[in-house]
Amino acid sequence: MNDTIASISTTLGVGAISIVRISGKDAIKIVNSIFRGKNLEEVDSHTINYGHIVNEDEVIDEVLVSVMKAPKTFTMEDVVEINCHGGIATTNKVLELVILKGARLAEAGEFTKRAFLNGRIDLVEAESVMDVINAKTDKARKLSINQLEGRVSQIIRSFRQELLELLASIEVNIDYPEYEDIEVMTVDNIKKEMKNIREKLEKIVKESENGRIIKDGIKTVIVGRPNVGKSSILNRLLDYDKAIVTDVAGTTRDVVEGEINLDGILLKLVDTAGIRETEDIVEKIGVNRSYEELDNADLIIMVLNNNEELTESDRDLLEKIKNKNSIVVVNKCDLDRKIDLQAIDDYNFIEINTIELDKIDILKNKIKDMFNLDEIEQGDYNYLSNVRQITLAKESLSILGEVEEEISRNDPVDLIEIDIKRIWTKLGEIIGDTYQDELIDQLFSQFCLGK
């Protein structure tokens, strides 16, 4: 944290502009040593200065240099951004000079890591920086911006404040029992407070599934026997021919993937190899991968052929998806019915075909209903949105359950207090008020360079 870091903050390639970012106590001094123009150490903060980057007498590039002095910067350190002409050779040369003059090449996510460690942003806001960059839908953008502005963090802080006030009351009762003008903190009082916090925390955990869907999308795996129309359904959903469609069984031998924006939610589609017994080595590998995809799916679309009776393979697959989020699609409803619909009466099934263009809308609408996408549309986007955040919230709920058991056993208040502190600490891990160095290093290593 005491050194100066530098990195290219824009995509490396041919473009109009590229930016080399420098942050640290020597940022201005280092850039000033290779800048021909105004003395950057004397210019006002948050100014843009015209000049040239030079290597002794050689002019490297004509640039605009932004000077931003601590603490009013993203990292809360001195920050300089060199706006170069876009191009690989020129940008790399400018970065090379900056490093030769004393800066260190930044690690992935190190600028944002410094912003966190210097108190500029909390952990939820830090994670949202990359979410804004990676957002593929407008809903994902709104969710990320809400987190970046600290709205989700405020909710978590309010939970912690309630717990802190409860802990303070317990401490006063334990340490100063002789005072008569303080509220006696009985087990019943604690039970009432815990019930109030549980209701709020359960609500945010329940709604966090919406946040995960908005951010990560819905991984949708299409499965079924060969030639039931899986690839045709994929192509209809994507509205172009992504998968090869033929009458030859086993045409699809590996997973074929695509994405669509369904009412602002990313639908990550995976078409799998037709599931059947086969001696073909390549096809067998594809079938095994189909089974693997089932375990990682948010939604399974199982396709059956309306024009064929159910086979043993169909029944086995129906049994596998029985307790999973699934839609059974009876495809080719334009042909004579030979399938026994009563056999799938307990499943969430629809009838479509891929000949009529509007039939695919039946499937889209079914997915919207299953995941309450209309409800998400009307939400406030104040959700937890990744596995780390959601897991910590669920762990907090689990500890809260332990507190409630202790209350029901009428355990001593000072023992109950210990577990209430655990909840307070666990919620602090969500926003980074409490954390482990290893977690922080691992988290920021997933960021892109220069951010």
Image: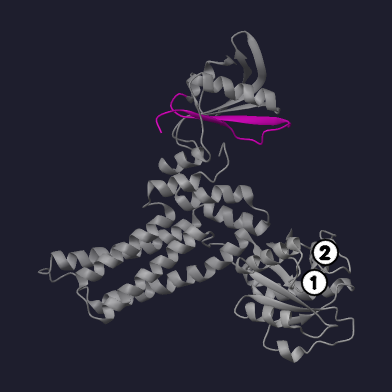
Q: Nearer the viewer, residue 1 or 189?
A: 1
Dot 2 corresponds to which residue? Answer: 251
The correct choice, above or below, for 193 with respect to 51 in the image is: below
Query: Which image quarter is the C terminus in?
Result: top right
Dot 1 corresponds to which residue? Answer: 226
Task: Point out residue 103 in the picture as x, y percentages from the top left corner.
Answer: 49, 25
The correct choice, above or below, for 199 with respect to 72 in the image is: below
Task: Point out residue 421 in the picture as x, y percentages from the top left corner.
Answer: 29, 63
Sequence order check, earlier mark of 2 and 1: 1
Label 2 residue SS: loop
Task: Point out residue 199 in the picture as x, y percentages from the top left corner.
Answer: 43, 74
The amino acid type of the residue labelled 2 equals: Thr
Q: Nearer the viewer, residue 272 or 92?
A: 272
Residue 92 is at least partly visible in this image: yes
Q: Is residue 236 left or right of residue 345?
A: right
Task: Point out residue 65 in the picture as x, y percentages from the top left corner.
Answer: 59, 24
Q: Is residue 249 left or right of residue 421?
A: right
The correct choice, above or below, for 48 with respect to 108 in the image is: above
The correct choice, above or below, for 38 with respect to 378 in the image is: above
Q: Is residue 180 left or right of residue 218?
A: left
The amino acid type of the residue labelled 1 equals: Pro
Q: Is residue 195 left or right of residue 91?
A: left
Does 22 appear in magenta?
yes
Residue displayed at 57% across by 48% down: 130
Tag 2 and tag 1, C-beta contact below 8 Å: yes
